[in-house]
Image (cartoon, rainbow, N blue to C red):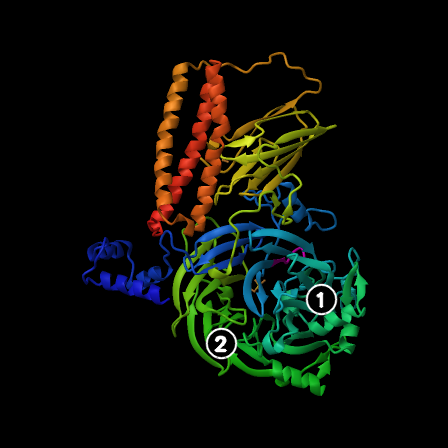
Amino acid sequence: MKRLNKTAISLVVGCMGFAASAVWSADSLQDVLKERGLSQQDLLAAAKTYVPTGKRDEFVAFSSGGQSGQVIVYAIPSMRILKYIGVFTPEPWQGYGFDESSKKVLAGGKIDGKDITWGDTHHPAISETNGEYDGQFLFINDKANPRIAVIDLRDFETKQIIVNPIFKSEHGGTFVTTNTEYVIEAAQYAAPLENKKFYPLEEFNEKYRGGITYWKFDRKEGRIDTAKSFSLELPPYSQDLSDAGKGVSEGWSFTNSFCSERYVGGIEKGRPPYEAGCSAKDTDYMHVINWKKAAELVAAGKAKKINGHDVLMMETAIKEGVLFLIPEPKSPHGVDVTPDGKNIIVAGKLDTHVSVYSFEKIQAAIKAGKFESKDPYGIPVIAMKDAVATQVSLGLGPLHTQYDSKPCIAYTSLYVDSQVAKWNYCEGKVLDKLSVHYNIGHLMTMEGDSTKPAGKYLVALNKLAIDRFVPVGPLHPQNHQLIDISGDKMQLLYDMPLPLGEPHYVVAIDAKKLKPAVRYKVGTDSRTDKPHAGATKAGEERIVKKGNKVEVFGTLIRSHITPETIEVEVGDEVTINLTNLERAQDETHGFTVSTFNVHASVEPGKTVAVKFKADKEGVYPYYCTEFCSALHLEMQGYLLVKPKGWKPTKTTLAAQNYTEADYKATLKKVADTQVIIDSVVAYITSVNYKDFPEVVAMVEDAFDQLGKTKDIKAKHEAAFAKKDWENANLWAEQVWQYQVKTADLGLRAKTFLEQNGAKKVK
Ligand code: K7E
Ligand code: CUA
């Protein structure tokens, strides 16, 4: 921040007309401000968010993509979008849902045997170690079709989707326990827990249930272990958000509810709607759960199997003292445990107050057996006065709370007021309010739900954008607003339109904690993290035909696909395995075959398979879909689907007319290019390039490319000896192609070294 502030100050000083150095004269800056109608405040905000080319952001945010079923990755403070991660929904660019391995991941999300190709994602969560973000995994839920996904942050790919075996919808997920032992998922709309079981709404109180699932996360495998996961049966109160205890409250979890009235609306039956009946009472219930003890009870065999899944029934949970309720005012939404785990902050949507619950008081009441009543299911209810430390009136429609790096400081979103309230939960004091645009839902501070919030910035996730952006039709973009929270007063910095919605929650991590890979180990199946059965080494490309099954073992490297012709018979089942042999950073190749609805994104080292039935005779070009090199367009081939029993009548390809002069001209081009390569190599080896791992990788890759010219040189010389000008010329051209790739890499390495202060070595 210090650095940014300094930049900002010098810019402001510059625009005030003092002598300014360098390229931007005071006049021109002044002109720009005037021309664009910008204030000094705007300029300061711009300076705090602008990240110049080549520089990187400080935090990385993972936003729910709402109904898109994806995750949106963006950077803070620039708010530049970095990636969309396909999660519950196919994502064509990444081949997600168009290649075999990713189809399997998506198939994990099938419900009752049917594909569900959208998701209502709400709450992403980053894996934690000792309550701090560790940057290894990301989890996210699907509210509509109760599912959870696991994303590995080594490659930002979705690895697993699992379906909740007993819920029909959910909301209070995903939230992780302190060491990511469990991923919490709470139900939303009550329904019978048994699958495909009908009970009439008249039996709502008896047969409909809510619940919470604790998904066991196996960190070593990087997957949820469904067999070791369990749920807790809960009353048919609409369970809402959850949070895991930390510090003193570790081992416990907290889940809100609304509509604890258990109201069943029905305008068509003359009954007032849900919204009336579900907000009639002054309070709903917070569920307080000792998950550690619940897990022990399940391990001791005290759970009941429902749909093959361990469920700890309410009766057992009550008897064993793992489940309690506390009233909370009125239609609560967010429940957020403070970084030290001592307090739980709850906001009631229809109440101006936030309530600060004390974990210590809750424990004292439980120990003393001090309960004010029992709910209709026999769950002990702790009196609010025995659990609440303080209540603070913040404004209309308080929803969610996040924490600052400064002790006792919290930020709460005020939906109705369209404001963010900054307040002190230890002293119960409001400190500042800032208007946002408009109707804020969640808000998020950097690592703000961990035990070590990083402060600095806050993002307001506004439900409405209304007038903020150039109109794009009745469906507006979402508006994420960046707010500077480093000072006493909050400062609005930036409006980011998000074109994918509706995002509910977002989490942001210090960028330095993320350690994503730049390439895969050659032959990796990225969706299983294991070697791919179709992995192929250079020179071992082949086409294997067994009956009507054709399997291609191919490779990709700039700028060709091997094989370049695939011949099958109509009706054959075709599997094309492709391994990207590149080692250079960002040398991704894409792959598709015309009209067969397959696509693969093959990053360096990855192996991907696409599969389809060649059910129509014809000629289908295939090609690389990523602009990977100068000869990218030539990275092509033909799938020939022949009629059964077809015999060729013509056996030679159309001839070209190359001459000796063509061959000589190509040789000259080769020699000239070699001069460039030699000079680049001379530069690189004259400096300490070995101190730059990025350059070492590029140099290795460059020599790989150049190494291939040896055999090919032998081929053009052999053709030359036979006066076969066509082959002599074409093989010489191929030598040149490898040289071009070598030179390209070499020049990139040279530029990198020059820009990063490489030093001469003797
Ligand atoms: Cu939209 Cu957390 Cu699902 Cu609140 S939730 S706003
Ligand atoms: Cu490979 Cu384009």
Question: Looking at the picture, how far across and down is residue 382, in whole percent?
Answer: 68, 82
Q: Is residue 58 left or right of 523 when viewed as pictured? A: left
From the viewer's perspective, is residue 304 above or below residue 545? Answer: below
Q: Which residues are magenta?
A: 140-147
Whether residue 3 is situated above or below residue 344 in the rendered picture: above
Question: In this rendering, does residue 282 appear at all?
Answer: no
Q: Residue at x 44, y 20 (%)?
A: 729
Q: Report the amino acid beneath label 2.
A: Leu
Query: Which residue is labeled 1 in the image?
Result: 211
Left or right: residue 595 versus residue 237 is left
Q: Which mark is residue 385?
A: none
Which quadrant of the figure contains the N terminus? bottom left
Quadrant of the rendered image containing residue 259:
bottom right
Question: What label sits on residue 394 in the rendered view?
Answer: 2
Which secondary structure lies at badge 1?
A: strand
Provide residue 245's location: percent of width, then percent of height: 61, 73
Q: Would you say the residues marked 1 and 2 are in contact, meaning their CB atoms lie under 8 Å apart?
A: no
- The 10 Å Cα crowd at callout 2, few under 14, some 14 to 19, many 20 or more, is many
**Can you name the residue that lies furthest to the top here?**
649
- Which is in the foreground here, disc 1 or disc 2? 1
- Identity, as a three-letter code, of the amino acid under mark 1: Gly
In the rendered image, residue 490 lying in the magenta stretch gets the answer no
Query: Badge 1, how many Cα within 10 Å: few under 14, some, many 20+?
Result: many
The quadrant of the rendered image in which ligand 1 is seen is bottom right
- Secondary structure of residue under mark 2: loop
In this view, the residue in front, 412 or 22, is 22
Q: CA distance from mark 1 to mark 2?
A: 31 Å
Residue drawn at x 61%, y 37% is 536
